Amino acid sequence: MESSIAIQVLPKVDGESEVIRVVDEVIAYIKSTGLSYQVGAFETTIEGEYDVLMDIVKECQKIAIRAGAESVSAYVKIAYKPEGDVLSIEQKTKKHQQ
């Protein structure tokens, strides 16, 4: 696995329930990709090939808009190592899980 990303999607909508609804649609899309992912309180981490992950980042914005957001901001962290593997979600978090 050459890449992992963490993405936080912040849709501009009215009310907390609408934020949650739109973010849930984005997470459902991420789940549908079949890639390894982990949902956190502030962001979702996804593992895979760099180009595939960049396409997912773009689609997350479009999904939020189609779900009714007037606009969307996203904060993205990218780990990329073209010649080898980056640390996996499990390697980073396993010892901290309850």
Image (tube, helix red, strand yellow):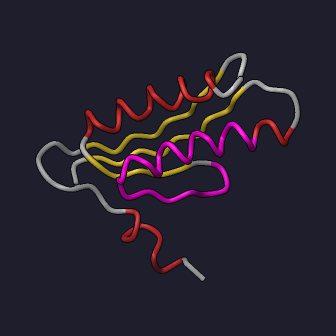
State which quadrant residue 19 falls in.
top right
Residue 39: percent from left, percent from top: 56, 57
Residue 95: percent from left, percent from top: 48, 80
State which quadrant residue 58 falls in.
top left
**Above-or-below relation of 57 to 35:** above
**Above-or-below relation of 29 to 57:** below
Residue 23: percent from left, percent from top: 66, 41
Residue 39 in the magenta stretch? The answer is: yes
Residue 36 in the magenta stretch? The answer is: yes
Horizontally, is 53 left or right of 96 in the view?
left
**Above-or-below relation of 37 to 72:** below
Q: Residue at x 56, y 47 (%)?
A: 27
In this picture, which residue range is highlighted in magenta?
20-42
Q: Residue at x 71, y 23 (%)?
A: 69
Q: Residue furthest left?
A: 83
| Most foreground residue, 24 or 37 | 24
Q: Residue at x 11, y 47 (%)?
A: 83
